């Protein structure tokens, strides 16, 4: 059986890939990546995500406003995300969330935009892609208050421990592991990789950011999700092809992708 990988969080439409996007997608296919979700971070990049998904059969889109961009998330921007969310091949709302590590937007703007787009996701019945950095208490509280469990979603690039993973699962979310699980100092991520039930786990690159071990300092790309998959399979004592098929099935079920 050949690998069947799904990169559930990539920014394939970002300018970092403008010079070699087709070659990058070919490398992804060659590595067994048959599906990718490209993620918008504000209205303009969400439009680019939708356009790329319309062109590439293996690419679907999510549209949203990243916490870094929340200060610009006015009524016009939110209305544009709502319009884009209705486009074909838009299968999720995101990325959205809170980032208190860099605080590039004021926390009150982050929370306002996060709540508004959780409300949009619930109205549309689409799952959410959640970004959380140094903000787990507030993110988990807001996800509960806004009843995100009704639509489900993915805690992307999960960075917490087993206790936080359990709370995410209790809220109805899936956990996505990215390149950091492959690092020599992976903190609690190996425990998390072993803890999450097989039907609640997915993987991602977050490319062009966060390359896995062996590619650190380089641009990340979807083909490298195979490295993360291999490490997670090793941690769970499973074969990579069986694990990949399982995680792909999870992502497809959540996102409504055949
Ligand atoms: Zn993110
Ligand atoms: Zn991202």
Image (cartoon, rainbow, N blue to C red):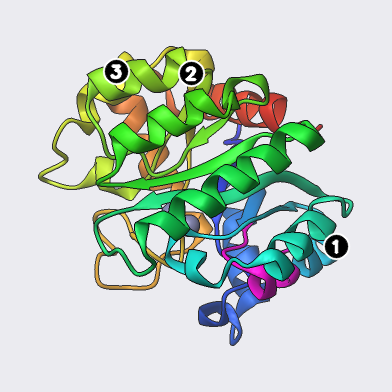
The residue lying at 44 percent from left, 28 percent from top is: 240
Instruction: Report if the beta carbon of the residue with label 3 is closer than 8 angstroms to ligand 1.
Output: no
Residue 193's place in the image compared with 229, above or below, is above
Q: Which mark is residue 194?
A: 3
Mark 3 vs mark 1, CA separation in Å: 36 Å
Query: Does the magenta segment cover residue 96?
Result: no
Please give the range of residues in magenta. 39-49
For label 2, the SS is loop
N-term-proximal mark, 3 vs 2: 2
Which secondary structure dominates the residues rendered in magenta?
Answer: helix
The residue lying at 57 percent from left, 29 percent from top is: 146
- Residue 183 position, x and y percent, is 19, 47
Q: Which residue is mark 2?
A: 171
Mark 3–mark 2 CB contact (< 8 Å): no
Residue 65's place in the image compared with 47, above or below, is above
The residue lying at 80 percent from left, 69 percent from top is: 51
Q: Residues within 10 Å of mark 1 (few under 14, many from 20)?
A: some
Q: Going by the image, does 29 lie left or right of 145?
A: right
């Amino acid at each position: 059986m050949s690998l069947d990988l799904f990169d559930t969080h990539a920014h394939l439409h970002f300018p970092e890939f403008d010079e070699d996007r087709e070659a990058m997608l070919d490398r992804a296919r060659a590595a067994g990546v048959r599906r990718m979700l490209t993620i918008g971070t504000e209205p303009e990049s969400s439009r680019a995500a939708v356009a790329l998904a319309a062109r590439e059969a293996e690419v679907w889109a999510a549209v949203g406003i990243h916490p870094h961009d929340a200060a610009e998330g006015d009524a016009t921007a939110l209305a544009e995300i709502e319009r884009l969310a209705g486009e074909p091949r838009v299968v999720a709302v995101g990325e959205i969330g809170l980032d208190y590590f860099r605080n590039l937007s004021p926390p009150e703007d982050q929370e306002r935009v996060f709540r508004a787009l959780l409300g949009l996701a619930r109205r549309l019945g689409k799952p959410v892609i959640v970004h959380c950095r140094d903000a787990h208490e507030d993110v988990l509280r807001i996800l509960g208050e806004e009843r995100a469990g009704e639509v489900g979603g993915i805690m992307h690039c999960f960075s917490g421990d087993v206790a936080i993973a359990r709370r995410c699962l209790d809220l109805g979310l899936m956990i996505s592991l990215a390149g950091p699980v492959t690092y020599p100092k992976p903190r609690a991520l190996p425990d998390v990789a072993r803890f999450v039930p097989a039907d609640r786990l997915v993987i991602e690159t977050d490319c062009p950011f966060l390359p896995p071990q062996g590619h650190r300092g380089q641009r990340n790309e979807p083909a490298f999700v195979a490295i993360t998959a291999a490490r997670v399979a090793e941690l769970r004592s499973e074969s990579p092809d069986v694990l990949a098929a399982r995680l792909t099935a999870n992502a497809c079920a959540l996102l409504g992708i055949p």
